């Protein structure tokens, strides 16, 4: 049983689990922080961005000045943004049988995997995950494709050149594997491979393994997965939340009695309590608008925005903000707001009951009805006619590198009356703001991450008591900036096993039982597989042609064995007793023969002849069948 | 007893003795008992029994084994005790064989009824009432009651168990206070039998080492030494203290809390603390022996004692400071925390307790902080008071709790992980920090205090209750901050702090959490009240947006916030701080609108709190001659009273009378007794001739308001109005200039209106009143009589014993009728 770790990002995981002769990919996260190294894509021609000076080496060599631009001491790649893909070399991804998706943020790399690696398996995900995941991908593709950039930079990726660049470009990892965004066609093709599942539905994989999604409480349709065979159980916990927000609450009970619990997707800001941050968000928003300033909220088109709108719905009247317009700008804004209202069965109990009244589960319907919240596909078109200031704008992308947010940053950045409030925790806000410096507008960082924090994790682990915990290495030590906070790490017994990108972990399974069926007759020779649809295992089918190795049984009487050795010319034989058996030491040959109840090892240094001789002597004492 | 009651009594006793007619209500039996107690205190019980044989019959009835209800049984036992409290009556009941029957083994003790806790309680209460004279002691000893009391100490009902313990103390006290005139016998074996039995039982319990028994014995002793201060208590302590000392050898220590209570009770006893009976040594030993959490209350108790050896005080203080020393050591690499009394180092036991679990750690720290907070203002607190290390410890704990401390040691790291986000400790530490503001500290530490308070006020993670405490602590520190020498304005550090604080306050006033907005406004009110006159404060406040935000919150959806906002803007306006003076016309406009806005709140707000707050603000404005009010005081008062008179909330109406009184005092030209600080008022508005004044009062419709209030359905409002009118009459009458000068005034319409109001018809308004008519009505009203009637409690008419007896009989009668109806 092995775990192949393809992503180094703890909240955007991509792991492959080999379990009972099945190969299961757990999530397919796309690390988009690589885009922070690129210049923003302005929707409207920006003289400031297009006039940035090219970057030249210290010695004045300016051969990179077409690719790299300098802004306030930072260097950016002037090209279409590129993403850091999961590791593709560690394991042959064409052998992956199924991909299990836990939430819509963790499927953004799916087209890269399903379309370019020879993948022929099935993807499992819940319906809201697929629908909202599609919206996120559609938005991403739209953001990038609508600002075509002729130029593509590749010179800087050359390892020798990269070494000469300033940080953070110098330290960027695996730049050669960075890829441009996929197309809508690839998205559609990838999504067509998804099979929809419901919570607690049991899915059989080849009769060997059963997988089940469970509610994880983090987002609409988000799930944790149980992967079990007859005697083993692996729980995959990714992006879960115990807070009462809009999704169905987390199902903890079903995670009990796991042999291994793979734990990913904890909160990225463990020191920030979401409630406090929402308060901070509202207060800062009110203060800015009251002073005649505008508020910009870079965000994803789904998720926390629903909760924020709900909070604002309750807050605006008390804060006297009823006349302030709220704009939500995204190519998928309309679909996102509408989808949220139709997935009633995936919502928390409170919202579900509203549907029976019947009322829309989310109050943003009322905000739209009363014209307080308006949504537009982009800043072009109707928006420019309706636009009224001061206002609050929710728009993407949170990286500030593409999407309508770029326009607002350019438009409002010069006035200190305006405020940009960061609520998405995925990007460092300082890095996101770097290409906009110098910036007069106020910046507030209120990351709202409802995923589990370490206190909740320790309670969860106490509750479900897995035998072993496996997690990204980041969770096994306090964050580097707060090395004294011993409370900000996973504390469990036995200590959690940690993994990092491109690492293979042998999972600590103690296999005690196996369910087998014994047929009275020897089975007929299996016919060679006709189609490789489900079981395309070229390499593993070969054993049929090999000569079967005989099985051995019996025990080795040590005294007789020593006599035999001496008979064959080994004069300096010494025997040591160990806890499990004996070690026979051939001093001159510097060789050990370790005889235990269930294993025998011959350890000799690069002397194949000697090893074979000794092996044959050992085999004399054993029966073959 | 009055004859009416005597007549009713036989019927009532018959009802009580009849098991078929159960008494519905416990409280009437209690009232009946109270009544009998007052009768027996005033006269002879024997006579009472002889005059009312039905009472003895009732008691005899109890002896018969029949199904009397537990309540009546309990009542009868208690009643018998009340009668037997007088020796003559005791003898009488003894002769009638009643007492042994009731309290001996033949009585309820052996019956099934004993299983009801109320019967056991009545039995104990009866004995408690009975044991008032020496002749009761042989009875107690002979009838075996003592053994029963011993066993009741462990009763399942806590009330019974506690009463049993107290009864033992009472009997012990009674048996030893009596005949022995000289010094008590140094041997308890020479004491009366009852006392010997009780002491023997206590000794046995202490020797048993079983926690329940030891706890009972210790509790009895604690009460004994707390209440009895005869010389015999010294003999008792000398005999028992070795046994108590033996307890200290036990591991685990049985009944540690009770032991602490006992030792403190002994130490507080004037008889015992002055004698040298090894008490101080025992206390010192106990301090060493107890766990940190148990030792805290003992240490505090020792430090509160008036006279106790210095060494013991030092030891106790050391114990109390122990947890804070641990915290300081954990945060710092220095070997011992500087500034704490010598010998106070975090010992390993305390460290282990702190690190054992989150609840133990929070419990110990909260207890320690609370104890030190209690100790801080006492005159007998240890001197020198380690202000600096205590400040340091409070700051460190707060930093551990918000994760901003960088602990140097392993213990510090673990402590930080335990305390981070612990709201309970945060609250306790902020309270303690606030208490420490009474004195200042080294500048460096004061800066740290300001910094940590700002951190808490700023942090989005601070819970609303923590924020409230942080605001309170900040206020205490701000108000205690030193003034710059030679200048009455704020010192530069405070000024700097304020500049950082006000943006935080501004943000908090925008919080989506109403508790936070409320605490913010309360803080603003307080700080403005104290510093409204300081130029530095005024400047910083006006430069912030805070006054505008406070005004905005007058329309908050939460009524508590609206009330706080009313108080805050009222205070700001009193200090001339409500406008930012953006433009002259805006300034004028805003002023006008604030008064109008508060009047709007008063007349339209759906909740009582904001309206009450508005009335308070108006009263204060009137008292302080607020500029807006002074412009046209009469119109102001008229509008406010008009709004208040229609209010459904009695507190608003009562506050309206308060405002009327202030106005009255100002117009009559005499400072009201209620506002002794308004001495400047008469100069501002010199009093006119009485007629003029009365006309002014009539114009603002003060009379109508006060007369209406006189018949208010809420007694307190009526009382207040009565006081006001009495004050007015006293002020107006002696001058007497108007007295019947121009013929008799027409008082008929006024009196007619008053009658209508008294009858509950509130609609009719009173027209303009002539001063003469008012005075005439005032004179004709029996205000003194009314005040007397209002001063009685509302149930004074129904409280007579006669009505009690009638009520009890009536309920039984009704019950009987209902039963008949059923057939």
Image: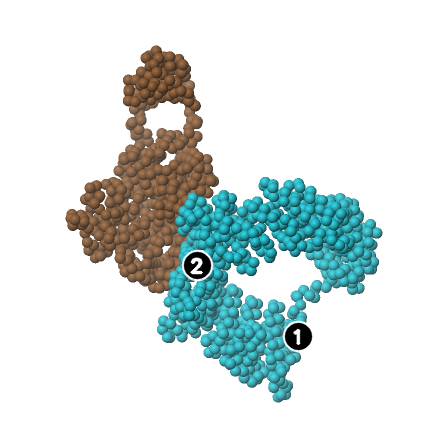
Marks 2/1: CA distance? 61 Å
- Write down the colour of chain A: brown
| Residue B515 percent across, percent down from the top left | 47, 58
Instruction: Give the secondary structure at mark 1.
Output: helix
Asked if residue B560 is positioned above or below residue B234 in the image, the reply reads: below
Q: Which chain does cyan denote in the image?
A: B
| Residue B141 percent across, percent down from the top left | 77, 47
Can residue B160 be seen in this snapshot? Answer: no
Q: Residue at x 38, y 56 (%)?
A: A281
Residue identifier under label 1: B784
Badge 2 vs badge 1, beta-carbon distance below 8 Å? no
The crowding category of the residue bearing disc 1, from other C-alpha atoms within 10 Å (few below 14, some 14 to 19, many at least 20), is few
Q: Is residue A377 left or right of residue B330?
A: left
For the N terminus of chain B, which image quadrant?
bottom right
Residue identifier under label 2: B442
Q: Looking at this view, is A608 or A573 the one in front?
A: A573
Q: Looking at this view, is A183 or B118 the one in front?
A: B118
Foreground: disc 2 or disc 1: 2
Q: Looking at this view, is B64 or B645 the one in front?
A: B64
Disc 1: host chain:
B
| Residue A15 percent across, percent down from the top left | 34, 37
Q: Looking at this view, is A193 or B377 the one in front?
A: B377
Instruction: Give the secondary structure at mark 2.
Output: loop
| Residue B442 percent across, percent down from the top left | 43, 59
Disc 2: host chain:
B
Asked if residue A590 is positioned above or below residue B493 in the image, the reply reads: above
Q: Residue at x 31, y 38 (%)?
A: A501
């Amino acid at each position: 049983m092995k775990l192949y770790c393809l992503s180094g990002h703890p909240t955007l995981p991509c792991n492959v689990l080999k379990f009972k002769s099945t190969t299961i990919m757990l999530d397919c996260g796309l690390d988009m922080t690589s885009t922070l190294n690129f210049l923003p894509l302005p929707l409207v021609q920006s003289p400031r961005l297009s006039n940035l000076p090219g970057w030249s080496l210290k010695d004045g060599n300016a051969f990179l000045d077409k690719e790299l631009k300098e802004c306030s001491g930072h260097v950016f790649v002037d090209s279409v943004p590129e993403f850091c893909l999961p590791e593709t070399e560690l394991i042959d991804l064409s052998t992956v049988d199924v991909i299990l998706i836990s939430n819509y943020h963790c499927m953004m790399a799916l087209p890269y995997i399903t379309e370019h690696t020879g993948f022929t398996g099935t993807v499992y995900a819940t319906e809201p995950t697929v629908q909202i995941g599609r919206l996120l991908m559609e938005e991403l593709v739209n953001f990038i494709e609508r600002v075509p950039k002729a130029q593509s930079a590749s010179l800087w990726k050359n390892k020798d050149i990269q070494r000469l660049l300033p940080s953070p470009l110098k330290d960027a990892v695996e730049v050669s594997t960075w890829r441009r965004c996929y197309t809508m066609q690839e998205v559609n093709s990838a999504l067509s491979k998804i099979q929809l599942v419901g919570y607690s539905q049991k899915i059989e994989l080849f009769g060997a393994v059963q997988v089940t999604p469970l509610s994880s409480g983090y987002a609409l349709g988000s799930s944790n997965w149980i992967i079990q065979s007859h005697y083993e159980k692996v729980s995959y916990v990714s992006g879960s939340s115990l807070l009462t927000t809009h999704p169905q609450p987390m199902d903890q009970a079903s995670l009990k009695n796991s042999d291994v619990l793979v734990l990913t997707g904890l909160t990225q800001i463990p020191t920030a309590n979401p409630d406090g941050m929402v308060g901070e968000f509202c207060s800062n928003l009110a203060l800015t608008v009251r002073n005649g300033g505008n508020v910009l909220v870079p965000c994803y088109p789904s998720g926390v925005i629903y909760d924020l709108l709900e909070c604002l719905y309750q807050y605006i009247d008390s804060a006297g903000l009823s006349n302030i317009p709220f704009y939500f700008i995204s190519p998928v804004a309309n679909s996102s707001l509408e989808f949220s209202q139709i997935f009633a069965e995936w919502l928390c109990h409170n919202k579900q009951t509203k549907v029976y009244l019947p009322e829309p589960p989310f109050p943003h319907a009322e905000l739209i009805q009363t014209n307080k919240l308006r949504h537009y596909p982009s800043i072009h078109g109707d928006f420019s006619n309706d636009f009224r200031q001061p206002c609050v704008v929710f728009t993407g992308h949170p990286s500030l590198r593409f999407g309508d947010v770029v326009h607002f940053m350019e438009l409002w950045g010069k006035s200190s009356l305006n405020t940009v409030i960061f609520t998405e925790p995925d990007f460092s806000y300082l890095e996101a703001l770097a290409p906009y410096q110098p910036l007069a507008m106020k910046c507030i960082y209120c990351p709202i991450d409802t995923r589990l924090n370490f206190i909740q994790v320790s309670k969860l682990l106490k509750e479900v008591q897995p035998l072993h915990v496996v997690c990204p290495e980041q969770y096994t030590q306090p964050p580097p900036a707060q090395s004294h906070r011993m409370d900000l790490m996973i504390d469990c017994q036995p200590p959690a096993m940690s993994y990092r990108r491109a690492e293979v972990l042998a999972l600590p399974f103690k296999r005690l039982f196996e369910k087998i069926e014994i047929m009275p007759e020897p089975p007929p020779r299996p016919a060679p597989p006709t189609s490789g649809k489900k079981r395309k295992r070229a390499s593993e089918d070969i054993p049929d042609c090999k000569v079967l190795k005989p099985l051995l049984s019996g025990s080795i009487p040590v005294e007789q064995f020593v006599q035999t050795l001496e008979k064959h010319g080994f004069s300096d034989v010494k025997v040591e007793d160990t806890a499990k058996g004996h070690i026979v030491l051939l001093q001159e040959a510097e060789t050990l023969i370790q005889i235990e109840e269930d294993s025998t090892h011959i350890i000799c240094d690069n002397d194949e002849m000697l090893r074979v001789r000794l092996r044959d002597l050992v085999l004399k004492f054993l029966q073959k069948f | 007893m009055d004859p009416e009651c005597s007549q009713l009594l036989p019927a009532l006793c018959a009802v009580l003795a009849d098991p078929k007619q159960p008494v519905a209500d416990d409280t009437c039996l209690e009232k009946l008992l109270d009544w009998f107690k007052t009768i027996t205190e005033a006269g002879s019980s024997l006579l009472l029994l002889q005059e009312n044989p039905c009472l003895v019959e009732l008691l005899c009835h109890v002896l018969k084994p029949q199904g009397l209800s537990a309540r009546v049984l309990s009542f009868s036992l208690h009643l018998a005790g009340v009668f037997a409290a007088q020796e003559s009556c005791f003898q009488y009941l003894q002769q009638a064989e009643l007492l042994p029957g009731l309290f001996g083994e033949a009585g309820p003790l052996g019956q099934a009824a004993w299983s009801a806790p109320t019967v056991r309680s009545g039995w104990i209460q009866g004995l408690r009432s009975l044991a008032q004279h020496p002749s009761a002691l042989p009875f107690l000893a002979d009838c075996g009651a003592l053994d029963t009391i011993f066993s009741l100490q462990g009763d399942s009902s806590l009330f019974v168990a506690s009463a049993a313990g107290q009864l033992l103390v009472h009997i012990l006290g009674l048996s030893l206070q009596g005949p022995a005139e000289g010094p008590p016998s140094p041997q308890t074996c020479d004491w009366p039998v009852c006392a010997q039995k009780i002491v023997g039982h206590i000794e046995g319990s202490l020797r048993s080492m079983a926690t329940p028994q030891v706890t009972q014995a210790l509790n009895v002793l604690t009460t004994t030494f707390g209440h009895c201060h005869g010389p015999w208590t010294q003999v008792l302590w000398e005999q028992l203290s070795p046994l108590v000392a033996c307890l200290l050898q036990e591991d685990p220590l049985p009944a540690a809390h009770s032991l602490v209570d006992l030792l403190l009770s002994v130490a507080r006893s004037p008889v015992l603390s002055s004698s040298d009976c090894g008490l101080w040594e025992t206390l010192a030993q106990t301090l060493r022996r107890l766990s940190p959490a148990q030792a805290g209350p003992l240490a505090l108790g020792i430090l509160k004692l008036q006279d106790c050896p210095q060494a013991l005080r030092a030891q106790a203080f050391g114990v109390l400071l122990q947890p804070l020393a641990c915290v300081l050591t954990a945060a710092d690499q220095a070997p011992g925390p500087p500034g704490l009394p010598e010998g106070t180092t975090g010992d390993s036991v305390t460290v282990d307790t702190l690190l054992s679990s989150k609840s133990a750690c929070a419990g110990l720290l909260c207890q320690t902080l609370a104890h030190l907070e209690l100790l801080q203002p006492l005159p007998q607190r240890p001197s020198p008071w380690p202000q600096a290390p205590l400040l340091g410890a409070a700051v460190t704990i707060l930093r551990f709790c918000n994760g901003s401390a960088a602990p140097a040691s392993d213990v510090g790291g673990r402590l930080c992980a335990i305390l981070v986000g612990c709201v309970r400790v945060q609250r306790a530490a902020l309270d303690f920090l606030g208490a420490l503001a009474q004195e200042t500290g080294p500048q460096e530490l004061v800066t740290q205090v300001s910094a940590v308070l700002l951190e808490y006020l700023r942090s989005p993670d601070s819970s609303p209750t923590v924020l409230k405490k942080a605001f309170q602590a900040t206020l205490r520190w701000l108000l205690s901050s030193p003034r710059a020498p030679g200048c009455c304005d704020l010192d530069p550090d405070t000024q700097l702090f304020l500049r950082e604080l006000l943006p935080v306050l501004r943000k908090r006033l925008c919080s989506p959490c109403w508790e936070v907005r409320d605490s913010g406004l309360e803080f603003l009110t307080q700080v403005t009240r104290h510093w409204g006159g300081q130029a530095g404060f005024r400047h910083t406040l006006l430069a912030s947006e805070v006054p505008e935000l406070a005004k905005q919150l007058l329309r908050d959806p939460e009524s508590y916030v609206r009330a706080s906002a009313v108080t805050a803007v009222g205070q700001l306006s009193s200090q001339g701080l409500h406008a930012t003076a953006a433009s002259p016309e805006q300034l004028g406009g805003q002023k006008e609108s604030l008064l109008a806005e508060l009047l709007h709140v008063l007349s339209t707000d759906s909740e009582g709190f904001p309206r009450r707050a508005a009335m308070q603000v108006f009263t204060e404005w009137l008292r302080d001659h607020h500029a807006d009010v002074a412009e046209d005081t009469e119109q102001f008062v008229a509008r406010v009273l008009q709004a208040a008179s229609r209010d459904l909330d009695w507190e608003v109406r009562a506050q309206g009378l308060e405002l009327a009184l202030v106005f009255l005092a100002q117009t009559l030209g005499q400072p009201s007794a209620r506002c002794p600080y308004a001495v400047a008022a008469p100069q501002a508005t010199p009093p006119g001739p009485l007629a003029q004044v009365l006309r002014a009062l009539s114009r603002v419709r003060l009379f109508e308001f006060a007369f209406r209030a006189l018949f208010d359905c809420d007694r307190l409002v009526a009382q207040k109005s009565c006081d006001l009118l009495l004050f007015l009459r006293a002020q107006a009458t002696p001058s007497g200039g108007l007295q019947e000068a121009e013929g008799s005034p027409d008082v008929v319409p006024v009196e007619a209106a008053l009658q209508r109001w008294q009858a509950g018809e509130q609609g009719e308004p009173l027209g303009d009143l002539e001063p003469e008519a008012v005075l005439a009505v005032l004179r004709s009203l029996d205000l003194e009589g009314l005040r007397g009637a209002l001063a009685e409690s509302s149930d004074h008419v129904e409280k007579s014993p006669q009505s009690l007896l009638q009520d009890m009989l009536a309920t039984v009668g009704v019950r009987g009728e209902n039963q008949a109806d059923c057939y």
